[in-house]
Image (spheres, rainbow, N blue to C red):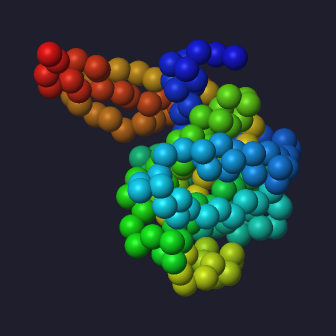
């Protein structure tokens, strides 16, 4: 197993998957079980989840997601590179009125757990909420927060330093390597005592 820093660095947003590598509902449920153990504001635990490893349901979910806004000439993965699993993260308003950052903590934990198993994933907030609520019959007291796409990755992602021009947009090179510019640590820490 890789050390934690290596795991975090390997956990890039993956947007292309091996569609022949199926995931089971059990794998997805185990990832939700990891999230179940994370911190929650006031320990209210208001998050609920829907998991799908069903190809037809996955097609419906896929149609509701906005893929890679910076890659303007790419409309998302072709069928052979689409995810084979999804976890839909919902906030239950009957449990709490606000969800603070609970869904972010849960989603990152799910993605780290997936990467530790050799899987890749991508967290989505660019969602056609009305359409997805209809497809999944999501009740009104549940607020759709995020969708996490999961599967076996077929793309390579590489972390680069942000260049002098400050451009932080991710991009793909001619070999389809996905480059993700990250700011330098010295640019982030304002003061250190």
2 versus 98 height, above or below:
above
Of residues 74 and 101, the one nearer the viewer is 101
The quadrant of the picture occupied by the N terminus is top right
Residue at position x 39%, y 67% from top?
98
Query: Residue 107, how many percent across, how many down?
Result: 55, 48
97 versus 121 height, above or below:
below
Of residues 79 and 153, the one nearer the viewer is 153
35 versus 63 height, above or below:
above
Q: State whether residue 68 appears in this view.
A: no
Residue at position x 52%, y 26% from top?
8
The quadrant of the picture occupied by the C terminus is top left
Query: Residue 146, how many percent across, how many down?
Result: 53, 59
Q: State whether residue 86 appears in this view.
A: yes
Residue at position x 51%, y 77% from top?
94
Image quadrant of residue 113?
Answer: top right
Residue at position x 49%, y 46% from top?
39
Image quadrant of residue 147?
Answer: bottom right
Of residues 158 and 74, the one nearer the viewer is 158
Query: Residue 191, how many percent across, how many down?
Result: 13, 22
Query: Residue 186, how many percent across, how many down?
Result: 22, 18
Counting every numbered tag in the picture gives 0
């Amino acid at each position: 197993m890789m050390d934690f820093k290596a795991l975090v660095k390997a956990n890039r947003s993956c947007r292309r998957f091996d569609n022949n590598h199926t995931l089971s509902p059990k794998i997805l449920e185990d990832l939700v079980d990891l999230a179940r153990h994370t911190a929650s504001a006031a320990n209210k635990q208001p998050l609920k989840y829907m998991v799908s490893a069903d190809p037809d349901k996955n097609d419906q979910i896929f149609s509701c997601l906005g893929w890679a806004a910076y890659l303007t000439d790419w409309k998302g993965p072709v069928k052979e590179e689409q995810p084979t699993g999804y976890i839909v993260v919902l906030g239950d308003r009957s449990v709490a009125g606000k969800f603070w950052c609970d869904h972010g903590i849960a989603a990152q934990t799910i993605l780290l757990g997936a990467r530790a198993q050799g899987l890749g994933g991508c967290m989505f907030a660019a969602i056609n909420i009305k359409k997805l609520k209809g497809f999944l019959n999501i009740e009104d007291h549940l607020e759709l927060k995020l969708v996490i796409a999961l599967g076996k990755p077929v793309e390579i992602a590489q972390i680069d330093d942000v260049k002098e021009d400050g451009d932080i947009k991710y991009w793909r090179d001619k070999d389809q390597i996905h480059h993700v510019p990250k700011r330098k640590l010295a640019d982030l820490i304002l003061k250190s005592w």
